[in-house]
Structures are given as C-alpha cells and as structure tokens.
Amino acid sequence: MAHTEDFAPDDRPLRRGWTTGACATAATRSALSALLGGAFEDPVTITLPGGQNPGFALAHEARGEGYAEAGIVKDAGDDPDVTHGALVIARVSFGAPGAGVTFHAGEGVGMVTKPGLPIPPGEPAINPVPRQMMRQVVEQLAAQHHAAPDFALTIAVRDGAKLAEKTWNPRLGIVGGLSILGTTGIVIPYSCAAWIASIQRGVDVARAVGLTHVVGATGDLSERAAKARLGLAPEAYLDMGDFVGGLLKYLRRNPVERVTIAGGFAKMVKLAQGAMDLHSARGTVDLSALAALVPEGLRAQVLSANTANEALGLAGPALAAQIAEQARAAAQAMVGDAARVDVLIIDRSGQIVGESG
C-alpha cells in the first residue's frame, strides 16, 4: 500500500469496493459458464464469505479451443487502492482428469519465491480465501452441469507487474506481479487492516528467511536512513507507516532478537508520549512535556513552538537523544521481552539526529 491521508475528501459516506479475489471469482464463474456451453454470465453474481451477493459487470470476454476467459474491472470504492480500475481476468481451461482445480499465474500476477507467506514458494500469489472462493464456484457449476470439477484457472491482471512496484510484493519475494487478495471480498475504505496485514506478512518473511533484526520505518526517508546506517538484508525493512503498535504487538507474539524503529522527530515524540498510532490526525504532540526536557532558558520558546520540529530546531540534538530514549522505552514496554528495541530519529533532510542507547 502507498501512504495516504486518513480522511475522506468530503463528508459523504465512503463507498466500499471489491477485492481482487472477489473480482477473480466472479470472472471465473462467468468464464466457466461459457466454457460449459452456456453464455457468459453478465452481470455475474457470486457469494462472498460473509454471505453477501454482489453483482459484477463484465469488461472482457473471449473463447478459444478448450478455454473461455472473462474480465472484470476492479472497483475499490473510495479506497486509494493501487489496483482500483485494474482489469482482472480469469481464463478457465479443461484440466487433466482427477486433477481438481489448479491455479496458475497469468500476466501481471506474481509468483511466491520466499517462505513465510500463506502460499508456499513456487505457487502463484493467489491467497487462500480467493482460492477457496474460486474452487467453490467451480465445484458448484460443475455439479450443475454433471461435469467433473477438473479445471485450470489462470488469473491475470492487466499491467499488474507495473502496479506491483507500488506494493509490498517485491520485498516479500512475490515476483512478476500482484497478489490476488481478500478475506471478505470487500474493500473497506481507508482501513488500517490491509496495511497491518502487510506489516505482519513482512515479519513472517523476515523470520522465515532467518533474519533476527527488523526495521519498522514510518516512511521512505526514514527507511533510507536506516538502510544507510544498518545495512541489513532487504527483507528486514518493514514499511510500518504510522502503525508502530501493529508492528510491536505482532512481534510480541512472533519474536525476533532486535527491532529498530526509525521515524521523524514528531512521530517519535508521539511514540515517546505513549501513542501507538502515529498519524497526525490521531493525537497531538504535548509541547509541555517537551519543554520539561530542555534547559530552563528554552522552555518558554519550546512551549510556544508551532510544531515539534520547530521545538527540535530550538533545542537541538540533545532533545532528539532524550526523545529517542523515551520512545525506545515506550516501544520496549509494548513488545516486552520478545525483541530488543532501538530508535533512530531522522530529520527532514534524511539525517539521523537522535538515537537511543
């Protein structure tokens, strides 16, 4: 996921959308209907894990010798999803007798190359719930047509390889394209759940490849600074965003030896003051607590500062070092004995201006 602001452009209710897994399932149903001798279902209706029955309009259909394919344009609703508007295509072919339903990566769908993900290495990046949804559709339609449920499903996403560059996939070891995702079939706009799930999968991969030190960075600038300082393997770096609590809670249950938290001064002040969600819209910096850390002659200026970064400019590196240590203590309390915590504070030029320990 890409960093976004956590507010809607106006006060209207946010519109929900559909996951790539739901789109692939609907495309599979329509294509299989055509392959079994009928027409392409359009619109095509599926049942989601929660019992909802959305309908999808086809944007693509094709037939060939032994196959049929259908495509649906993903509508992510009001969520800033990189796959919004992408064409998700399912090609359904007759499979070998007794093979059951098999899954294959078409153009724009990635392959798993590293352990630690819900799908093992060597498999297309089609997650378990979408696989189950598609398998159920195939088995239902096959039974209705008195056919064996032996079909090969090839899922593709137009321009998926390019879109995948904006996701976690490259660092998770998913190469060549996107993942087909979704646990409910529904995209909830501006949900933290998808981001936190990506953080968790990043931890899983890091542990699976044997890493003992991971880095949670609040953004690209902080990650680059941490990379320059620490020089760890690419899998060690987690795009934590504002969800430091989500990372630390997961590490408490899935430990590593060491975690470094890297972020800007204002966000680390919020962590030091006990916040586990560092977004600017959720809580403010307590300037009086900052003022208590500086020499008496600076306290009035820090109290009247407009921002935490202005306070840092007034007080200098000594304040950053104190905040780094307080942030480390707050994070250590959250993660417990599961990992040793370090904190790096990065200024707006990308330089490390404070660190714990």
Image (tube, rainbow, N blue to C red):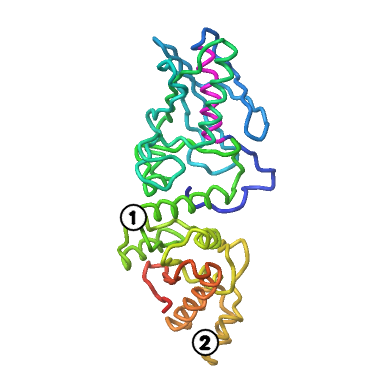
| Residue at the outermost top position | 37
Magenta residues, as a range?
19-34
The residue closer to the viewer here, 1 or 238, is 238
Residue 86 screen position, x and y as percent = 48, 32
Residue 327 screen position, x and y as percent = 51, 74
Label 2 sits on what residue type? Val
Looking at the picture, does residue 39 appear above or below residue 218?
Answer: above
The residue closer to the viewer here, 228 or 120, is 120
| Residue at the outermost front position | 98
Closer to the observer: label 2 or label 1? 1
Residue drawn at (51%, 28%) of the image? 24
Looking at the picture, does residue 59 appear above or below residue 210?
Answer: above
Q: Quadrant of the C terminus?
A: bottom left
Would you name the residue on which mark 2 appears?
A: 294
Residue drawn at (32%, 66%) of the image? 230
Q: Distance from label 2 to label 1 (Cα)?
A: 38 Å
Residue drawn at (56%, 61%) of the image? 279
Would you name the residue on which mark 1 appears?
A: 234
Residue 115 screen position, x and y as percent = 38, 46
For disc 1, the neighbor class at 10 Å (few under 14, some 14 to 19, many from 20) is few
Q: Is mark 2 on a helix, strand or loop?
A: loop
